[in-house]
Image: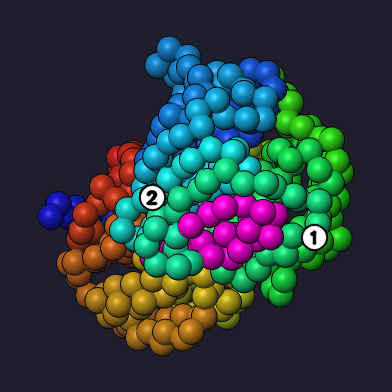
Amino acid sequence: MEQLLLSPSPRLSGTIRLPGSKSISNRTLLLAALAQGKTLVRELLDSDDIRHMLGALRLLGVTIEQVGNSRDFVVHGVGGAFPVKQAELFLGNAGTAFRPLTAALALMQGEYQLSGVARMHERPIGDLVDALRVAGADIRYLGNAGFPPLAIAPATIDAGRVIPVKGNVSSQFLTALLMALPLTGEAVTIEVVGELISKPYIEITLNLMARFGVKVERQGWQRFTIAAGQSYLSPGEIHVEGDASSASYFLAAGAIAGGPVRVEGVGRDSIQGDVKFADTLRQMGATISMGDNWIEASAPAGGLKALDVDLNHIPDAAMTIAVAALAAGGTTTIRNVESWRVKETDRLSAMATELRKVGATVEEGRDYIRITPPAALTPNAEIDTYDDHRMAMCFSLVALMGTPVVINDPKCVAKTFPDYFEVLASLTR
Ligand SMILES: O=C(O)C1=C[C@@H](OP(=O)(O)O)[C@@H](O)[C@H](O)C1
Ligand SMILES: C=C(OP(=O)(O)O)C(=O)O
């Protein structure tokens, strides 16, 4: 197994340009593929999750051209129906590819199989399948009930009824239904049963759908209605913002190791909920400033403060707070993150195990984690990353606390940020 030793660098400052947003890249690709007309998608993220979406769309008969060696792509929209009616798709561990493609393909009157890596086959999808079945979809489980892999067959779809969906396991199920059901042309009502988690991701979905010409009326977070006869139309061009979750590691770096560290590509104008990570860092005492398209963080004179916070609205960037808590005075509690258990790994368990390796006292609850830093961090801890890009990126912050740390299998960052460690090293010491 590859290991990366990060030597201590207690001071850090500089500016980095963020890679494109995963959430915006994969939504935009799917909407552009389904739309009528050509879309120029600018500054698409280059990572495993996006390669899975690109590869799947091409297998489904969508023409997508890269502009030279740039990250700009021209997507030739198919106007609502994929030309290829039989395909086997492998989608790695990309939730933003697997869930939305399941919903879109369930409406396509074709024979499709969708699978992923072993961990994807442990990540739930039953709530989405149940909702699609109410609309008439024919979806079978090829392994365990409620989980991928899936087989989809042609079916008579009737979306003109209330489609209920549970929202307490992943918001991606609601996102998938919202993006796919307008393809039926029927008047659609989706009703969220119970609590909805990760709400800001629904705002990204609605924002991008609107740019492709489909309006959704919503009553709070409970009821979403789409008027009949709407269809996706290319807006011509979409620019992909920088990734706000990827920004969290650099902003935390500035807040821990002096700074200022500036990230370019997201700011006040962002449609990503994870820009709110900056507010949490500010509550920890960091100095934050923000422009339309950049955010900057510096360390406070007296060190970071511990917090007791509900981070359900930023589940991905919340992991960065868990590791930043090692640099805070006192005990930090992160609440309402049960969804961590069904992501790339069981992140509550993985985070607790690895934080203990650097000497922290950790309490792991069903849906919370409580972290008390040690008087001195344990040097050269070997951090397991569980094929979870965010575990690798978060724990790099330990080196900024003046303690050397070893990251096992560092290349797992390829899911969303293949050159993360090079970009981190580019900040001046
Ligand atoms: O819709 C999206 O782009 C995402 C939604 C979130 O998942 P959940 O809704 O499962 O929390 C987030 O963790 C994931 O990285 C991306
Ligand atoms: C949860 C994540 O990924 P996915 O889109 O596969 O759900 C993540 O990137 O942290």
Between residue 34 and residue 327, name the one nearer to us.
Answer: 34
Judging from the image, the colouring scheme is: rainbow
Residue 112 counted in the magenta span: no
Binning the other alpha carbons within 10 Å of mark 2 as few (below 14), some (14 to 19) or many (20 upward) gives many
Residue, far left: 1
Which region is colored magenta? 122-140
Residue, far top: 68
Task: Give the structural element (helix, strand or loop) at label 1.
Answer: strand
Q: Which residue is mark 1?
A: 162
Asked whether the viewer can see residue 63, the reply is: yes
Residue 144: numbered disc:
none
> Three-letter amino acid code at disc 1?
Val
Residue 115: numbered disc:
2
Residue 299 locus on image (x, y percent):
49, 60
Asked whether the viewer can see residue 261, the reply is: no
Quadrant containing the N terminus is bottom left
> Three-letter amino acid code at disc 2?
Ser
Between residue 97 and residue 20, name the one nearer to us.
Answer: 97
Residue 7 locus on image (x, y percent):
21, 55
